[in-house]
Image: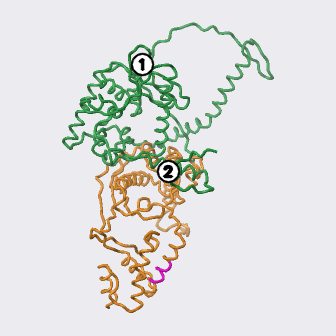
Amino acid sequence: MNDVNVIDETMPVVLGADNLVQMADMAEKRVQAIKRIKQAALSVTSKHDWVDQNGKPYLQVSGSEKIARLFGISWTIDEPLLTTEEDGHFSYTYKGAFTIGTTPPIDFIGSRGSKDLFFSKSHGEAIPPSEIDRNDVKKSAYTNLLGNGITRLLGLRNLTWEEVEAALKVKKEVMGKVEYAKKEMSEEGKDLRKKIGSMILEMAGNDKDEAAKLLLTYTTFVDKSGKTVKGKSSLADVSEKAMPVTYGKVEKIYNEWKAGAKDVGSTDEYDEFDKSEFNK
Amino acid sequence: MLEVQTNTTNSIKANLTSEEIVEQIREAKRTKIKNYPCHVVRASEIGHPCERYLVYSITNWQDKSPYDPGLQFVFEGGNAVEDMAINDFIEAGFKVYRPEPDKAIAESRPAITGHIDIRVDFGTGRVYTGEIKGLNKYDFDSLNCLEDFYNSKKVWIRKYPGQLMTYLYIKGEERGFFYLKSIPGFQPKLIWVDLDYSYMESLLQKTERIEQHIKDKTLPEQITDYSVCERCNFLHLCLPEIKRQPMEIIDDGELEAMLNRWSELKPLSQEYSQLDKDLKQSFKGSEKLMIGNYIIQGKLIERKAYIPKPIEASSYWKYEINKLAI
């Protein structure tokens, strides 16, 4: 009898049919398990636990806690780490080890900083870091850790509104909403912004990266206490209130630049820029 | 038409959606949520099961997580209920005293602060201190004596006896009362409370320990009851280790098949029970009946009287089965 080697070209050569079936079974079981975990988790939450965050469902810590209770998730959390930047902005980072039963603990972090739009903007206006409540940021970092640890441990990230709506049998419209909406800038503000953009871009030789650096330089200043306050590298981050001041400063520099002056600007940072960029 | 709007600081936009109007209302509540300095233990808190929480409440009051605006509505509802309750006593003709900040409380040692809701003379010339609480229907129905407060699963209800007894102790009175009102429904219930000296002694010792911790800048040990911790506003400072029993995931085809069959039969079982009840109600009093292909025979059964045996205290597992929507 002649042995005929029949090669099935639809099958990976390293695997036999049995292995493939086993793998497919395992994959199927895995998919089913993930589905079941998702559904079980969703079933213990209510509409009050979800908010619409810029179009995506976001599970609040109240919901994460319910899920943690259902699955029996345990954790230990270290003391938070406070990081302070030169411009006065700060952030808190919590690290925690999360586990279910005898599975080895997995480390997750939760972090929130004063630059987060939730803290740093109010009605479209920038709030200086000195006016942001450190405790609010700290508590937020803690709840961020719980949310991260619990949902990531169970693979519950990136749920869609369709999945949440189907499980809770409610429409997303009845759930809370969080939007980091910026207040619409006035026509005057927009006009100044446009003019600043044109002047800076011209001085930067139409190089956008260079223009961003220039803007950062021009908007950096030394406050009354002698501390350097880092500026903005995008005009979108300059508030309406700060727009006329920025315009005045940039216009002065622009006019001097146009007039061919070399020694322009008033801050140390600008002088530094002047030496490094103009005197090449 | 009389304009009753008083807050004119915010310009009100026209054509707001219902969600935007509600959000503006919630935002207004949010602005009322503030942490206030706390220098001594509050009577309303002294019954809290965690001494570490009580120390944090004084040393780190500013770090307390703000509660949800939803709870602000509840608190304001509670204040409204308090006014309604006081009116109940006045309408009934009892002599009511609404105490001003009390000198005895201010001078109490160890220092415990608080504010008595009401003092009432029920016509005997003796004035009783009362604590008013607005409660949901379930809690209202389940609280009928002091033991029910101690045994409640809800931490805030377990704190109520400590609050009232502290007032009684400071005022030097042996007896006071809880006046409960249901929400909704606003029905009244009055529960007399006698000062329990041994419980009060434990609260005073607890207050002294808290004072000592504050003086020494130390913290009491963490508790291990996470049902208390998970509602704590100092969780982000305390960082207790959370140990939970994991969910068991069982791969048992036979049990799963039984559950599937259970799930299929459940609606039929409910329908059967209802039909059985309705049919037997229709036949009541008839001995013999023929309806279509059915013969129904009835018999009057005499039920013998019996004295039920008291049920001994025991524990049992109660299960709820829910099918996942997959």
Residue A196 included in the magenta stretch of the image: yes
Q: Is residue B77 visible?
A: yes
Q: Say which quadrant the N terminus of chain A sits in.
A: bottom right
* Crowdedness near tag 1: few (<14), some (14–19) or many (≥20) residues, C-alpha within 10 Å: some
- Between disc 2 and disc 1, whose residue precedes? 2
Which residue ends up furthest to the right in the rendered image? B292
Q: Report if the CB atoms under discs 2 and 1 are less than 8 Å apart.
A: no
Residue drawn where x is 43% and y is 49% of the image: A61
Disc 2 sits on a residue from what chain? B
Which residue ends up furthest to the left in the rendered image? B216
Query: Left of B134 or right of it: where is A222?
Result: left
Hey, what amino acid is under mark 1?
Answer: Asp
Hey, what amino acid is under mark 2?
Answer: Glu
Which contiguous range is marked in magenta? A194-199
Could you say where residue A51 lies in the image, as x and y percent from the top left?
51, 53
The image quadrant of residue A121 is: bottom left
Q: Quick check: A89 above or below A161?
A: below
Q: Say which quadrant the C terminus of chain A sits in.
A: bottom left
Q: What residue is disc 1 on? A: B121
In green, which chain? B
Q: What residue is disc 2 on? A: B27
Considering the numbered disc 2 on the image, is that residue within a helix, a strand or a loop?
A: helix
* Crowdedness near tag 2: few (<14), some (14–19) or many (≥20) residues, C-alpha within 10 Å: few
Residue A86 included in the magenta stretch of the image: no
